[in-house]
Amino acid sequence: MTQRVDLRVGAAVADAAPELWGLFIEDLNDALDGGLNAELVRNGDFEFAPTDREGFHPLTGWTVEGAAAVATDDPLHPNNLHYATLTGPAAITNEGWDGIGATEGQHLRLVVFARTVTPVRLGVQLGDLAETELEVEAGGWQRLETDLTATATGRGELRLSVPDGAAVDIDAVSLRPLGADGEPLTFRPDLLAALQDLKPSFIRFPGGCLAHGHGLDNIYHWKHSVGPRHERVHARNTWNYHQSRQIGYTEYFELCEATGATAIPIVAAGVCCQNSPGGQHAIPESEMDAYIQDVLDLVEYANGGTDTPWGAKRAEHGHPEPYGLRYLGLGNEDQITPDFRDRSARIEDALRAAHPEIIVIGTSGPMTSGADYDAGWAYARERGLPIVDEHGYQSPRWLQQNLDRYAAYDTAGPKVYLGEYGSWSSKIRSALAEAAYMIGLERNPVVRLASYAPLLARVGHSQWTPDLIYFTAEDVRLTAPYYVQRAFAAERGERIHEVELEGAQPVARELPKEGAVAVKSNRAAIAFSDITIDGNPICDARTGPGGDGVVLAQIDPTATELSFTAVRESGTDGFGIRLGPADPHTHIRVDFAPWQNKNTSVFRHDDGIGNHESDHLWTGMEDGVPVHVRIKLDGPRVQVWVDGEPHHDHTLDTRPEHRVAAGVLSRTVPDGLEYVTRLVNAEDTPKTVHIALDPGAYTADIELLTGTGPDEGALFEAFPAPPTRTQTKGDNGIAITLPPWTFASAVIRPA
Ligand code: AHR
């Protein structure tokens, strides 16, 4: 039966944040190289290296026929050290990114740098799709270019060959489709269109972890990413692959222009990521002045006149007009150490002195609470930073419990940039929880900016899930969370209205009273002994590496005490223990050194989706060294001791969840006033929401995103039912019917 819900729209209470919805871009999951970058050749510079990933080498992506090798003497450019040498008969063939696709009649531009002692005809073949030759003159490195036209639609590989007796050096091989203007494309068009449809107010770049780098030598230096592509500085990608930086800062600013977004670059705050080997390191004192100057130069590159050195560079790179940079983020999820404080403050001081127009954004750790979060916020307040970057990957349950998180924030203090968030699945359940949470973001003006993360993932090449947009070589797969982001950004309001919702109550979740104690290890063999449950001894057990784990006993997960000794016999990292019924039922998981052999963590699972609840720094497990664990479960309270040391005293949140949510903004248009209304129904009964407005006749344009059940939608797949559009009319308001598992975004206007 359809449930009636009444939505009363109150007075406007504050101005809405005008730039709230934006994008987070990081070269993660082949998002850029192999993704948004329109380049079709993989490793065209021959710069892949084992330091990027074990097994990578300068000929990764290429197959070799005959005498072809790699050399480094007298290179094309010092930043592009490796090149291929072919002594005929020989050929090298590039596999592209899962092949190289073209459609019949499509024009593509091939660019090759080559060098030879005696003139050579370089054979060029794109599978069965196109074929030509390039003349290489005798002499030093020369840039050769030719346009190919595909004679059929299909996929092929790019083969470059030299005949018997000929010899040639080859580098910086590039193949890009041509755009309507006859110029090679910078961005893959279908992905660019998917980003343009998100109508972002801003784009954050280059990350994420990529910005502050895995080690000091891995910090993203913007100057390495501008200028001619074959002169850019390649780098190990933090996510265990290679970054060519072909989508560097120049292309980033270009992307902002192409999507109508403002730029939010994130630069390292003078320290690298705390998860780097040996932890966080600070840029040495001797290099700090130069680093600070680099940050100032970035602002000049973006905004300086062409009479400034870096403004002139921008013009040389094709863009004489300034980009109008207004924001700059300092750091990413950094630990607030004395080194961080020192380096960050100096960069900020220099920015404030030289560029008071730039809004500097601080950082506050990877989680929505905890030591880094507290320290990041305290530091931001102390420094008077205008905005703080918060990150919060949380389960749908958590989001639905925390819609009003930002109501408690001090509006007089720094404002919030929710720089990374998402709810751990591509299901409609996640999309609806995100929509409800976004209603919360939208109605708390302390939140100025928000960007879902990560944005893009190539199917089969991902390091992080879920992602907003999946893609293959051939298609772009839009997820349910994508459609939610698109709907919020497409229709924005200017004023936030008070709302009252009647007829739909938040729902409190019961904690199950029955379930198992089960242990599991992905990468280690672990032996468990001295196991007692409520003082009663039980049999020893052994688990891992891999497998489904072992059930030790049945318990009441709200009233149990257990203890055991765990010994790692072999392998890496530690183990996890489930306390309660298996997914999709609510249960607790405690992990002991699950990653990088450090930390213990408490997770809570609801509806099959885990949520990180609490962390404790720990030295991890060693082969043969016993670890004594005690766990006490008392109602929602979870206590964990390791070797007698308290690690966790965490109380599970039992507050009700807002599975039905509503938000209303208004905006002034030439014809009068419009209401932008967001409605979420994350329940399995349909609702008709009656929206009461001032007397009069109204029409509404409604976009509806509906799942057939809460678990519809999957990682790496397109959501099967894109949103539908409908119109309705009403007197003194509007009634909108929400099928179960639905998000609606409606624009209501006087008829
Ligand atoms: O979005 C993926 C990663 O999550 C980002 O690089 C990092 O900032 C966060 O931990």
Image (tube, rainbow, N blue to C red):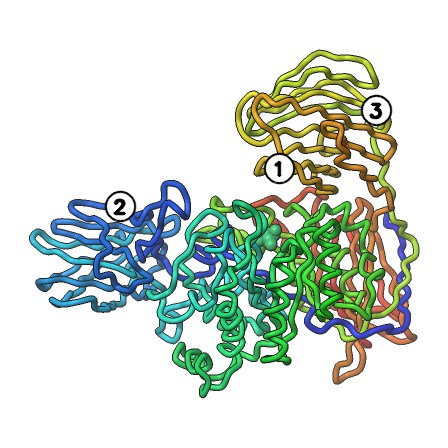
In front: 367, or 667?
Answer: 367
* On screen, residue 622 above or below 228: above
Where residue 369 sits in the image (x, y, percent)?
A: 75, 51
Amino acid under label 2?
Thr
Residue 453 seen in the figure: yes
Q: Quadrant of the C terminus?
A: bottom right
- Label 3 residue SS: strand
What residue occupies the far bottom of the structure in this picture? 307
Which circle, 1 or 2, is nearer the viewer?
A: 1
Give the mark nearest the N terminus, 2 or 3. Answer: 2
Badge count: 3
**Label at residue 598:** 1
What residue occupies the far front of the structure in this picture? 286
Where residue 280 sits in the image (x, y, percent)?
A: 57, 51
Give the mark nearest the N terminus, 1 or 2. Answer: 2
Q: CA distance from mark 1 to mark 2?
A: 40 Å
Mark 2 is surrounded, within 10 Å at the Cα level, by few (under 14), some (14 to 19) or many (20 or more) other residues, namely few
Where residue 585 sits in the image (x, y, percent)?
A: 76, 33
Amino acid under label 3?
Thr
Left of 731 or right of it: where is 75?
left
Task: Name which quarter of the figure residue 525 lies in.
Answer: top right
Q: Ligand 1 closer than 8 Å to the CB at disc 1? A: no
Which circle, 3 or 1, is nearer the viewer?
A: 1
- Label 1 residue SS: strand
Which residue appears at 42% of the width and 82% of the height? 312
Q: Which residue is mark 3?
A: 560
In front: 743, or 2?
Answer: 743
**Label at residue 63:** 2
Amino acid under label 1?
Lys
